[in-house]
Amino acid sequence: MAIDKAPRGPRSRARIVRWIVLATVLTAITVIGYLHQVLAVNKPQGVDALCPFGGLETLASFITSGVLIRKIAMSSLVLLGAVLGTAVVFRRSFCGQLCPLGTLQEGFGAIGRKLMRGKRLTMSKSLDRVARLFKYGVLLGFLSITWATSTLVMRSYDPWVAYMHLTTAEVAEYAFGFGVLAVSMAGSMLYDRFFCKYACPMGAFLGLISRFSLFRIRRNAETCIDCTLCDKACPVNIEVSSADVINSAECINCNECVNACPVKDTLEISTSGGTRLSPVAMTGSVVAIFAAAILLGSITGDFSITKPTLAQESGSAAGQGNGGGEGSFLDTGLIRGSTRWNEITEATGIPAETITDIFGIPADDQSRALKDSTELYSVSPGEARAWVDLWQTDRTAAENYVPGTLLSEDHEE
């Protein structure tokens, strides 16, 4: 039987388009993370506020009380909605088409293949099957504790949070996360998508949702020539060549198997009713869903790349729009390590001169984040919170305050 070869052009374009999208997302989010650390004004949101898993972490708190877990913003819920939208239609397409941590793993995987001259380590199927269950335990464990305590318990262990703090001096705070990141990248050089396969809680969650998705990869057994190129291309080691429909929760919809297939119309992305999409069209659809969610969220005010000022947060929390100014009462729980002294002045009306008189911080240095001024001026974010509380309840006592006499738990960011 003559083989109707699949043209190489569309397959190559599909790979190029996918990698352009992946590289763009990774670059953009890396730049945003860096700017969050270094900018004093117009600071971008932190990593937790721009991660869809953050939306999942705060979901219980938001549903039951309408309050977001600290460090999480509505933008995370918008992104979670976009991820769920793509998952319902295209399974774990976020993992294979957008996820920046997945991009890093595939990059290190490519380095590993170069170093090992195309060879990859293999794991026994029984051990691999058991190891992949670990990510479901991670999902259940961290979500259970987070929903029960309304705190981001995973933050110190999250490799993506660690990655976004690579340019900071907070190595000790994220030591475990850096360790997980290092193991994940090293592991990906030996086993493709190491973290995705064995430890990613978001991947586990989307794997459950993918059971009900509309589009799947389907194989035409009549035209398949059993070349197993699809198996070799799959970064999560699914045996595509032996399945009629790829139902595995491990499939990340990267479409590398479709692009590797040399026979026309043998592997295709389609619904059970026969509606088909090319890999490029699927990538474009995933990007369009995210773009629409972000646009809608921006219009409604639920999505913003830029972090609100302390006065804006305070006013929003009080239901007053923009807060701040003389006589305003500030919820000091909003003061974080990344908060600047001049934000406190704006939100509370405390004169900059008073801060200088009491703590010795010059007015022109009050744009420095609290956590960065601790070593210079010996005032921690916790003490700053306690002092602002004192100012709002007993101004005379605050004006006569002796630094170092108030203690409060620090919350860095």
Image (spheres, rainbow, N blue to C red):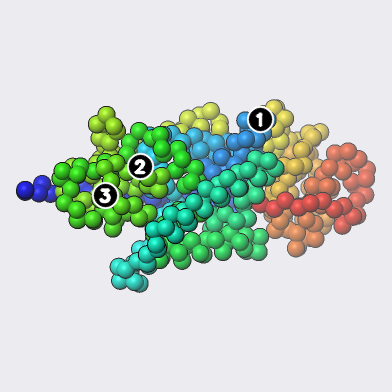
Write down the residue under mark 1: 64
C-alpha distance separating marks 1 and 3: 46 Å
x then y, percent, for residue 10: 20, 47
In this rendering, position of residue 294 left or right of residue 264: right
Numbered label attached to residue 247: 2
Lateral position of residue 64 relative to residue 327, left or right: left
Q: CA distance from mark 1 to mark 2?
A: 34 Å
Secondary structure at badge 3 equals helix
Quadrant position of residue 91: top left
Mark 1 or 3, nearer chain start? 1
Q: Which residue is mark 3?
A: 242
Estimate how packed mark 2 is, as few (under 14), some (14 to 19) or many (20 or more) residues with alpha carbons within 10 Å.
some
* Numbered label attached to residue 176: none
Residue 40: image location, x then y, percent: 63, 51
Q: Position of residue 334 (x, y in %)?
A: 72, 42
Residue at the spot x=72%, y=53% of the render?
Answer: 370
* Lower sequence index among marks 3 and 2: 3
User: Is 270 on the left or on the right of 97, as rendered?
Assistant: left
